[in-house]
Amino acid sequence: MQDLRFPDPQSLARQLAGDLAERMRKAINDRGRVCIAVSGGSTPLLFFQALSQQKLPWEKVLITLVDERWVNEDHDASNARLVRANLLQNEALKAYFLPLKNAAATPKDGFMDCENRLHELITRLDYAVLGMGTDGHTASWFPHSQALARALNEAGGAWCCPVDDAPSMPQRMTLSWSLLAGCRHLFLHFEGSAKDAVYAQATRPDQIQNLTDMPVRTLLSQSAVPLSLYRTENRGGDDASAA
C-alpha cells in the first residue's frame, strides 16, 4: 500500500489528478477505454477540477459514482450535480457519465435498473477514488448499517446496493465491494488531522478485521487490489474535510 502525503490540499489534488490521468491514458492505450468511479463530498472538489483539465481522450472514458444520495440532480446534496459542475468540464466534457440515481421512488425500487445499467456499460471498473468519513465509513458503507453485509458481499454479490439507514439523507445507492474488489487500483483520499486520527484507529492491528465498526477497513485489510492513500500531512490543528 502506498501512503502519499502532501503539504496542502492543492498539491494533493494536482498530484492525484496527474497520477490517475496517467493510469487512464495507459488503460485507454491498452484496452481502448477506461472506467472510473469517484466519490462525492467537499474533499474531492479540487481533485475534480484538476482532473477535468488533464489532456486525454475523454470520449473513451466512463465515469460513475461510488455512491449517491437518492435525490434529483437539481438537489444541493446530489453527487451527480457535484460531478457535472466540477469534473465534467474543460477537457472532460466528452466523458460519458453514468449516474446511480434513476427515476424510481426509492433506491430499493431502483436497484435492478441501476444494477442492469452497471453491467450493461461496465465490464470491469478500472479505478475508484474513495473518501473516508469521521465515523469510519467509505462509499455508503456505514457502521452497523443493515445494508452493510449485502454491500460487502464479495462472492457473487450485486454490483450496487440500496441503503435506507444512512445517518444523514438515509436513502442512498452505493457501489458494493463485489464491484470494487475487481478494480485495477483503488485510491483513498482524505485530508486533515481528524481524518488522520480515524485512519490510525482503522488500522489498529487488533481491530483491522472489525469491518462493522469501521467499514473503511474493508479497503485497508485486503491485499487483492492495490491501494494508494493520498492525504495531507498532519501538522496539527487543521480542520478535517467532509468525506
Image (cartoon, rainbow, N blue to C red):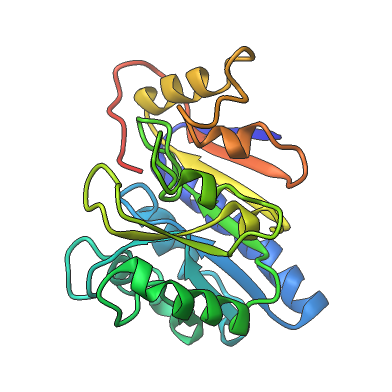
Q: Quadrant of the N terminus?
A: top right
Relative to 123, residue 227 above or below: above
At 64% from the left and 14% from the top, the residue drawn is 205
Location of the C terminus by quadrant is top left
Q: Nearer the viewer, residue 156 or 63?
A: 156
Q: Quadrant of residue 234?
A: top left
Could one spot residue 83 in this view of the protein?
A: no
Q: Please indicate whether residue 226 sits to the left or right of residue 120 in the image.
A: right
Question: Is 177 left, or right, of 200 in this rendering?
Answer: right
In the image, residue 241 sits, relative to residue 51, either above or below, namely above
Q: Position of residue 128 (x, y in %)?
A: 58, 57
Residue 102 image-quadrant placement: bottom left
Residue 226, x across and y down, in percent:
73, 45
x and y percentages locating residue 188 in the rendered image:
54, 43
Which residue is painted at 54% across and 31% down in the image? 211
- Residue sitting farthest toward the top: 206
Residue drawn at the location 44% of the way across and 45% of the way down = 141
